[in-house]
Amino acid sequence: MCTPGIATGTKRSSNKTKKKWMKEAMFYTETPRGIRCLICPNECNLKEGETGICKNRMNENGKLWSIAYGNPCAVHIDPIEKKPMNHFLPGTKSFSIATAGCNLACLNCQNWTISQKSPNETHNYDLPPEKVIEKCIEHKCESIAYTYAEPITFYEYTYDTSRLARQAGIKNVFISAGYINTAPLKKLCKVIDAANIDLKSFDNEIYLKLNGGELQSILNTLKTLKDEGVWLEITNLVIPSWTDDADMFKRMYGWLVQNGFAETPIHISRFMPMYKLTQLPPTPVDILQKASKIARAEGLKYVYIGNVPGYGNKNTICPKCGKTVIERRGYSIVQNHIKNGKCKFCGNPIVGTWI
Amino acid sequence: MAGWMLLSGWGAYSGRKGNFKSITLKRGILLISALALMPLVLTAVLYGLKYLLFPPGTLISFSTSVIAAFLLLFPVCFPAGYLFTVFSSLLSESQQSNLIGKAYALESAGSLIGGLIFSIILGRFFTTFQIFGITAAIVFFAGAELIGSKQKCFWQFITPGIMLPMLIFIFNPDAFVKKMFFPNQKLILNQTTRYGNLVVTQQAGQLNVYENNKLLSYTQNVMNNEEAVHFAMVQHKKPQQVLLVSGEITGMVKEIEKYSVKNITCLELNPEMFRQLKKLGKTYPDKENVTICRSDIRSFIGKNKQQYDVILLNLPAPSSLSLNRFYTNEFFEALKKRCNGQTVVCTCLPSTENYAEKNAVEVNASLWKTIAPFFRNRLLITGTKNYYLASDESLTSNITEKIKQKGIATEYVNAYYLDDALLALRSKTLISRFSGQVPVNRDFYPFMFIRQIAHWLSHFGTGYPVLVLIPMLLFIFAFSQTEPITAGLFTGGFSAASLEIALLLAYQVYFGSIYLATALFFAVFMAGLAAGSSLPLKNKCPKIKTYAFVQFGLAIFAFALPFLIQITGNIAAWRIPAQLFFFLLIFALSFAVGYEFLLASKLLQKNFSETSAINYSTDLTGSAFGAFLAAIVLLPVTGLTVTCVIVAASDVISGWLAFKKR
């Protein structure tokens, strides 16, 4: 089966065909029980034949395998702003790929038909790293985004593709929930250029109940990305009655400022009813605006509201002179007053990767 | 429904060896009174447990729902079934004659009265707790009447009968429960309508509308409002007459008005929503060019003669049989009559923007195929929903270009947000996965509904085959345990429930919503049972041949039902005669089943309690299988005709077994 213009469909019906997309995983160790995967804080201890929580990494013949290498289920071209990334190559397109599987289980996942499934259950495409680069160039995309589900679970595919992309002068964008161990993240940082990490809440219990993870690992990820020099933007999805508490906004944004993320763009994003939270209404816009005010008051310099067309907070404002340096409409740039990474009006540096 | 029947059957069966001589009138009334209180207590427990165990706004898994339903129904249904055996045995023993059929008739008559009171008064004007409070009070008063005012315990029944509803009306537990389940939201409306319970909440300027506790729509949804309107509106050269099916409340009228249309006709899934929200001043202000129709959507499209330039359908996915009727071949056929040569129709399904799971692909493919015969051109646009456009005129996916040409001011549907080429690419990707083999979705073969159910089950990792195979195997096992008399009751119950579900489906298709009509259906069904089981018998011991012929009669009825339903459909425009004919069919069906029960109670040569227990439980078990299998498996997978043939076959088999024994 052929998907018009992008990739060729595949079938994972037999063991032979499944093996085609298996690649030995990078971070694991042997244990008396079998194998412990060391890619994320779940650290699944897998017996022979078992698959990890992420459904994407499997113990077979005493080795850990990534089972959807070069076999993504979602392949699209998106504006980079949709990721969302506002300070990284604005106005460009990103070749976006994902395989099935995720190491979290967010009740509100907007891509649950991918993230909560195994690659054996999804409709996939034959797209090894070299082909990704080829397609990316063919479709004139400036970057490759590892996105939709969780690129941590297809780490090897992300890593190898990123390495090749770098050689071809293409940027790599890591869109993730950030639930990853430090060692694999540090290795990945050597080949990726930018990341958007979801900071879903600032409460460990909510992280456990809503997402099946824990907060500290995400905070560690943010720090590591910053230390390793990867361009970082943060998304904070506000879910009514779960993560819309003003005190929590204050603590979260306060922590970011105290830990050196004052200049990191933050996207305060609107929740829409999805997956297992379909009985909750979307986040009222007023609550998002309240959160953005708190963020600014705490000292964050680049605060955006996401998922709400027609409301403010889309433009980039120079933190020094207060003038609009990038005027946006939707995913497009109407006016750009950044020259050589600086505000054209006052010369203040505006952080980001600009064209 | 299936759980209720199974548990009642279990309760009845467990009373088969009972000695009920110690049960006096007072004790009997006390037992019934305790039973009448149970729904009130269990509803409170249900809400409490849901609040404690499940976070707000979360879907509850299928297995949890099934377990919870059984656990919560058990304290009501099991004793209710047991009490049937108790009272029918006591009645027979007191007269030294087999009066189980009479007990069945009386029980059915009680259900009939209950059904009527619910559909005429309780279901329309009262909330859940109030309904249970009132019904409990009625039972208390009836108990007091039976005891007599001279007895000491008379006031023990009268006092709670007065106090209970009073306390419920004063403290209004429903309002408390609603507050609990809609945290941080201001409850501005909680109204029972004949289409369902309507709740409207407000949160920071945003209105959220829930029907029967399901989120139906909300305001401040710019993306959806614009996509749903402009994708279709830009296709038409000069739209003048627009039909908007659901979306007035969320603000779509404002978007349509950007095209200087002459008239916008608005319909809602729950037409009462207009009236209720208008009272609160939350709908679009009265305008000359906006016509609000408080009518069932399907009936409106069938009856109305107006033709429209653009028809916008913004309905939820076909996740129920009542929603499926807006995505069928028959629906589009009727809709086509409201179209002129240039009309653009737009309907939608949930988004598969980034990835389409296999059930979602089949749902989308079926809709794509279903609309094909009626329009020369079709177009799929994947946005925040999957929009299906259809017209006899050409359609374009260059939406943003058209918007610009027409000079329509939008926040989201424009070149700043959307890339026409990328939209087209995503649509192509999805269409390339559509199989030509997928069936057309029909009223009586609701393929989209069953795939939507499978898609819903995949939220919890439950496969549809599990849902089908286990009950099927249990059905075969249960049937194999019967002997000729009970086999007839089993298939009779199975037929009654299956065909009632088929009739309910047909009712929705032809006459619209069934929220309160269900109670009327139930009442007519019970009336038939009561009448059938009260027929005077010429002989004390009827012939088994008669019993077999009743089953053959049921088989003929099942076999003829698709044709009878078709006749109803043909005369549906004459609403009253058509509905009368419909209810006549239900009455005829249940009359036969009631009569069958009466015959079986005379034919089964056992003592009173055993006869009562075995017959009642067999009848209910058959009904439970019928209700479940018809709704979840037979109708969706095989369609109406095959379902009726299967039901007829089951009656022929059991009838033949009885005939052989004559």
Image (tube, helix red, strand yellow):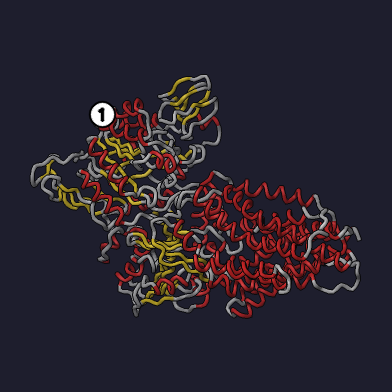
Please state which of residues B284 and B237 is positioned toward the viewer in this rendering.
B284
**Image coordinates for residue A107, horizontal then vertical, percent:** 44, 46
Q: Is residue B548 visible?
A: no
Give residue B288's quadrant in the image. Answer: bottom left
Give residue B84's quadrant in the image. Answer: bottom right
Q: Image point 76% across, 69% down: which residue?
A: B105
Question: With respect to residue B421, does A31 lie above or below?
Answer: above
Please state which of residues B556 and B28 is positioned toward the viewer in this rendering.
B28
Q: Is residue A34 visible?
A: yes
Please state which of residues A180 and A205 is positioned toward the viewer in this rendering.
A205
Give residue B535's quadrant in the image. Answer: bottom right
- In the rendered view, does B277 fall on the left or right side of B54? left
Q: Image point 57% across, 45% down: which residue?
A: B462
- Identify the amino acid type marked 1: Glu
> What SS does tag 1 mark?
loop
Q: How many marks?
A: 1
Q: Mark 1 lies on which chain?
A: A
**Image coordinates for residue B444, horizontal then vertical, percent:** 61, 63
Answer few, some or many: residues within 10 Å of disc 1's Cα (few below 14, many 20 plus, some between 14 and 19): some
Residue at the extreme front of the image, as rendered? B152
Residue at the extreme left of the image, as rendered? A346
Image quarter where the C terminus of chain A lies is top left
**Image coordinates for residue B18, horizontal then vertical, percent:** 81, 55
**Image coordinates for residue B513, horizontal then vertical, percent:** 55, 69
Q: Name the residue under label 1.
A: A228
